[in-house]
Amino acid sequence: MRGRRYGDSGQAFPIYITVVGGLLFLAFAYLAVGQAAVNRNGAQTAADAAALAAAMNTRDELADQWVKDVLDPTKWQDIFDGHIDVADSCWRADQLAAQNDATAQCSPDPPLSYRVDAETNKTVGDSVVPGTENLKSKARATAVIEPLCTFSLTGGGGVLPELTCRDRDWTLDPTDLTQLPGPEDLFDVHLAD
């Protein structure tokens, strides 16, 4: 007796090839999305670092000015409010962006913040998604300098006011200025939301 032959033998193979091809395409598409996410994170890192660097440089200049004017408390509030002339620190933003393989457009936002727009030097790269080979990621960050100290100008006669910075009180002796608060005690630098 002869066995029966079925006319649909081998029909699963084309379906298998189609499914495997579709899965490979999806895998490559997910890889492209991953490449874009990594590139975007690099841009955000560059923007954050650049904005913080510019703000920290300005914070240090404000603290240096406060040290110079420590014996004249009438100038303190202008320093803490950022209402004094300090050099533009966008050059620090450019340095930090370059260290993160990006370029930065920095703009001071007076009196006490910097906004940075960063763009990666590298593209997302070739992938199955058309148009990504020349696409560069961009990100924006704003860093803010926040004064941490308060004081009251009620004293006189060579007595400096007590400076309260966060939870610490600084009693300043005009005859011994060796123990002064540092820039990190006077100002906080952080990224804005």
Image (spheres, rainbow, N blue to C red):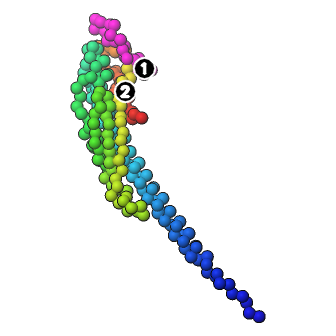
Residue 168: image tag: 1
Find numbered disc 1 in the image and state the secondary structure of the residue it sits on: strand
Task: Tell me the quarter of the image containing the C terminus.
Answer: top left
Place of residue 126 in the rendered image (x, y in percent of width and height, measured from the top left) = 38, 62
The answer to if 35 sits in the magenta stretch is no
Identify the residue at horizontal 51%, vertical 70% (top origin): 21
- Please tell me which residue lies in front, 164 or 101: 101
Residue sticking out furthest to the front: 7
Question: Which region is colored magenta?
Answer: 150-170
Q: Is residue 41 above or below residue 82?
A: below
Residue sticking out furthest to the top: 157
- Badge 2 local density, few (<14 within 10 Å), some, or many (20+)? some
* Residue type highlighted by circle 2: Glu
Report the predominant secondary structure element of the magenta stretch. loop
- Please tell me which residue lies in front, 119 or 60: 119
Q: Quadrant of residue 66?
A: top left
Q: Is residue 8 above or below residue 91?
A: below
Q: Which residue is mark 2?
A: 146
The answer to if 151 sits in the magenta stretch is yes
Residue sticking out furthest to the right: 1
Q: Is residue 191 above or below residue 46?
A: above
Identify the residue at horizontal 61%, vertical 76% (top origin): 12
Place of residue 184 in the rendered image (x, y in percent of width and height, measured from the top left) = 37, 28
In the rendered image, is residue 60 in sight?
Answer: no
